[in-house]
Every structure is written in C-alpha cells, then in structure tokens.
Image: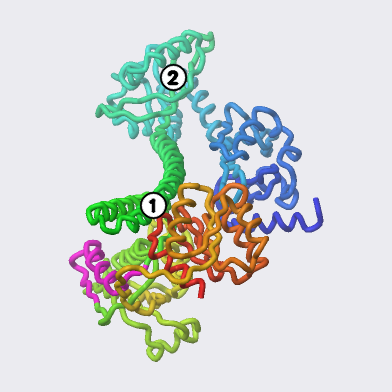
Amino acid sequence: MKKGQTGMYESRADQFPLLDQIASGILAIDRDATIVLWNHNMEQWSNRFRQQVLGKSLFELFPSTAEDIFKIGIDQVLAGGVPVIFSAQLHHHLIPCPLANGEFRAQQVTVTWLEDHQVALFSVVDQTEQIRLINQYKTSAQLLKSELDQRLKLEKKNMQLAAAIDQAGEAVVITDVDGRIEYANQSFVDQTGWQSDETDSVDYFDVLIDKSDDNFSEQLKLSIEAEEAWVGRQQVVRKSGSSFTASISIAPITNEEGDLTHHIIIQEDISQQIDLEEKMRHTQKQEALITLIGGIAHDFNNLLAGLIGQVYLASREVVGMPKTAERMKKIQTSAQDASEIVKQLLTFARQGEHFAKEFSLTSFINEFVKLAQHNVPENIKFTSDFERGAVNFRGDANQLQLSLLNIVQNAVEACKDVESPHIEITLTSFNSSEHGDLLKKYPVLRHGHFAHVLIRDNGIGMPANMLERIFDPFFSTKQLGSGLGLAMVMGCVRHHHGIIDVESKPDHGSSFHLFLPTLMPKKPASIEGDKQFGDGVNILLVDDDERVLESTKELLECMEHRVTIAYDGREACDQFNKQPDVWDILITDIVMPHMDGVAASKEMRLLRPDLPVIYATGYDQSLVTEETHKMKNTILISKPFNPDDLDRLISSLVK
C-alpha cells in the first residue's frame, strides 16, 4: 500500500458515520475488490479494526471469499449486476466472525452494487441467534412430546416453553404425522386468523396450503416418506380465504426409537419481501423504458429537424401557390406539435431532473394557494397576500410547487393542537430596509432582484436545537417521517440560486422565508412580416445525421449564410484547424461518433477562445446543460428548431 493510502480509505469510510449505528455489519469494496468501508459491527465481529482492513484486497484478506461459490456472485455484482444473497444455511461463513465459544457467527450477506458511489456494499446480518432458536424449537418440540405424557408433573415447564415460542416472530406449528395441528404459537394466529381453540380441528396441509401447486404436494410427500426436512416458499390460505406468501420449513420429529411422531413447521410471512422484489423489478423495467424513450426521442428529433427544415425551405419556393403554401404551413405546424410530444416524453424520461422555464411567479403563487387550500383542514384559517404587478421567474415550477406544499404541510402539522390556527402565505419584492439583519447574514441579497415568499404559521414552533437541524437529510420530528422533505426544499431553493431562512420559537409559530431571484420583464417581441436576412456569416455545421445536415445547410444558405459541413467532431476539428480565423460560429450536434460536439468545441477554442457555439441536441437538455452552461458565448437549443429562432440566435452571438 502506498504512503497515505490508508488515510484515503479512512476518509471515505468517515463519509458514512451512520453505518456505525446500525445493527448490521457493513463493508464495501471497489471494482478492484479493495475494502473501502468497514463499520463498527464488522470491527467487533471480526476482531479486526478498520485500519487493518481498509485498502486491502477482500479476496486476499479472507481467502474463503475467493472460492467459486462466493467469487462468481461477487464478480457479478462488481460488474453492475443484480444483488446477490449468501444465506447462512447454504454458504455458512463468508467472512469468519468468531464467537466467544469458538464457533462462528451464522451470516446472511447481501451484496449490492451502488452506482452512485461505485462500490459493492456488503450487508452482513447476524442470524446466529435465529438459527439457534430454530434448532432450539426442534429440540423443544421433541421434548414437548415426552412432556405431554408427563403433563401433571411438567405442566409448569411446558407453559414456560410455550410462552417462549409464542414470542417468536415466525409462526411455529407442531402437527401429528397426519398433519393435524397439535400446537401453534401466537404468530400463527396473527398470520392465519385461526384462533388457538380452533387449530386442533385444522389439518395444516389440507386447509392451509394452497391446493393449486401439485408440485409442492409431491415434493412434500417424498420428503415425509424419507423423513427429511423441506424448505421453500408456498401460498398459505388464511381463515378468511385470502392468502399470503410464506417461507416454510417443515422438519420431522422422531422418538427415541427413530419413529416419526410429529412435524415442526416454521412459517414466516414474506409478503413485504415479495413486494420489495416486485418494486425492484418494476424500477429496473422503468429504467430500461427511460433509456429507450431517450434514444427514441433523439432519433425522432433528428427526423423532425430535417422535416421542419425541408418544409420551411419548400414554403419559400411556392410563392404564388397559396393553397400549397397553406398546406406547407399546416405540415410545419403538425411537425412542431410532434416535437411537443417528444418534449413530453423527455419530461417523463427526466425522472426528477430540473426543467427550467420562465413564468410569472405572481400567477404561480396565486394558483398554488388554490391548490394548497385542499390540503389545509377547514378549522385552520388560511390567508394569502400578493404584491401587485408581475414578478418574472425562471425555474422548475413542479419542483417549486412540491417544495412549497411540503412547507405548508409542515405548517398544518404544527397547527393541529393550537387554538385559532392560522397559516399565511405572502409574496412581495425583497426590501433591504425591512431585512437589514438578513443582509448581514446573506450579503448576496444586496445584488440583483429577489422575490420574498413567506409562509408563516402560529403553530407549536421549534426550539433552537431543532431549528439548526431541520434541513439535515433524514432528520424528522414525525414518527413516520422520512426526514427528506425539508432537505428537498433546501435543494430546490439552492438549485434556483435562492435563499431560505427560518424563524421559529416554541409556542410562537414558524416563518419560512424564501428569497428567489427574479428576472426583469421582457419587452414584447415585434411582429415581423417577411424575414430579411443579413449579409450572412461563415458557419461550420456539424451533425452525424445526413438528413439534418442537408436540410439545415440549405436552410442557412437561404438566410444568406456561408456553410461548411462536417459529419462528426473529428472531421470538424480538421476543417477548423486549416483556417481557424475564417469561422464566425460553430453549430454542432452533441452526441456523435469519433468525437462529440462538446469535445470538438473545446479543441477549437484552444485556437479561438472567442468562437461562438450553438449546441443542437435531440436529447433532453437537462442531461447536458451542466456542461454547456460552464462555457461562455454558448447557447443550447433542442431539435427540431424554428428557422427564424435559429437566425436570431446566430445574430445574437455573432456581433
């Protein structure tokens, strides 16, 4: 290990202090199988401090993990595959963790790939006690038969034993050789609805097991005849007739002579686990659908770009043919409508990405108040006040709406137990004279223009120690809260380059102040008749789709521009490097073979730092905005684009 390498892994481990607080053992490895996380439980269980293991190879430190039974599954996860589970019963001890008695902890290990952190996370659950209890149940059941013969002498001991089994989370059932229930604990009653005084008339295999699975009946019959245990999943029918999926373990109980006398059945309701597995599969399908939609939208946008360009050109060639010109106009309108449909698909595929657009904050808050009223009980007074005049804002309306709803919902919770509850929302322009204290706290408010959104309640309020933590992820004062609501609000406000400040005291309510940057109102665009193109500029046009390239080239030439084309970023750079001072502007697609548009423009700007660039993309803009916004004198547009808009953009960049 190189000098300082251990410190690097320690630093990475310290990024997750909460992992030391959970009941499971947690470790993580990178793609090279190097251990990068080792929580407190793993230190205690394995008798190895994290300084001893961080930075070392998992396969070298624990040779058993290099065996095929483990390594194949681990390699699958490291390659980005689905999670792998190593059970305590089948795989024994993946990472040896000795107990005081010399034995090893029985472990169930789940290995999951975390894409965001590029590590494989090992969740180690200690099942030693659970397996010990199962073995104890089997032993206890054998003892129970003899205790039934000595009921008068051992009744007290039997009651204690039954009470212990009743506390188990799994249903424990004992049947005779024919399957009639002789004992069932409280968990069995809770799972099936059969009461304790009814179970003696119930045949477990005939009444509780779903008859639709003939394969199960055959396997169970063979296991009983061979006096072997059976383990698997099966549908269990409740008394009400409904059913649930259970993990069932059926084991034989024999007497001293080796004769079968009873069966012990351990039954666990795994419906929630099944639901989680189904949700995971649904998520994987949705991710695949999102990827498919993004690809289709890109190709479709290229087709529309070519179509709109050709229709625009054709419409200029049918002067004196009014009917044909009208039809061309309708075709162009239909193509633009199709592009709007593609935008809707991209909005779905965005899955949480911010989508900014300009809108009136005054109108938005006015509509928001109408929406929020449905979430405020009638016993709570809900008022609003707005400053006159339009306040223009650029941002993601959906994200902002969710954030404000979250604040209002918190205010509703705070007002539940107060007299004359009142929630108020106001919108005003930020006035520095009224908020001098905030200017000291947030000096950025001195610059630019900000709208002040205030949501105030007279609820129970918050103490200072709680106020300091309300925006921390996973911090919640609600019993069932996730602790992510206000963290999401903070993220939304920061994304929009705004500021959020909270004032609150116990029994004096809370005030949430949101300061959002506003835009200067735009002058109405003048309505032009026939578009008059200027003298034209030298344009280097780059796209890997020939349909888009040809129609766009002809379109730009009709605008009296001089156009040179290239089919990918590499070819464009070769063209540019021959005469770097000739080009007035670069118009390029982003995703192309050999070299993408962003890389090509960066190479060109090494020779011409002032080169204006227009990126034209058929993908969702939010996927590339972060990169392109860092570049000056640059504009990002979506395909298909309006011809007049394109000419105006060229004029704005080439001055």
376 drawn magenta: yes
- The span picked out in magenta is 358-384
What amino acid type is highlighted by mark number 2? Gln
Using residue 125 as the reference point, say whether residue 559 is left or right of it: left
**Viewer-side label of 2, 1:** 1
Pick the residue in front: 387 or 289. Answer: 289
Tell me: residue 209, above or below residue 373: above
Q: Mark 1 falls on what kind of element?
A: helix
Image quarter of residue 281: top left
Q: CA distance from mark 2 to mark 1?
A: 97 Å
Image quarter of residue 24: top right
Residue, disc 1: 310
Q: Which label sits on residue 274?
A: none
Specify the color scheme: rainbow
Q: Residue at x 39, y 67 (%)?
A: 395
Pick the residue in front: 82 or 28. Answer: 82
What amino acid type is highlighted by mark number 1? Gln
Q: Residues within 10 Å of mark 1 (few under 14, many from 20)?
A: some
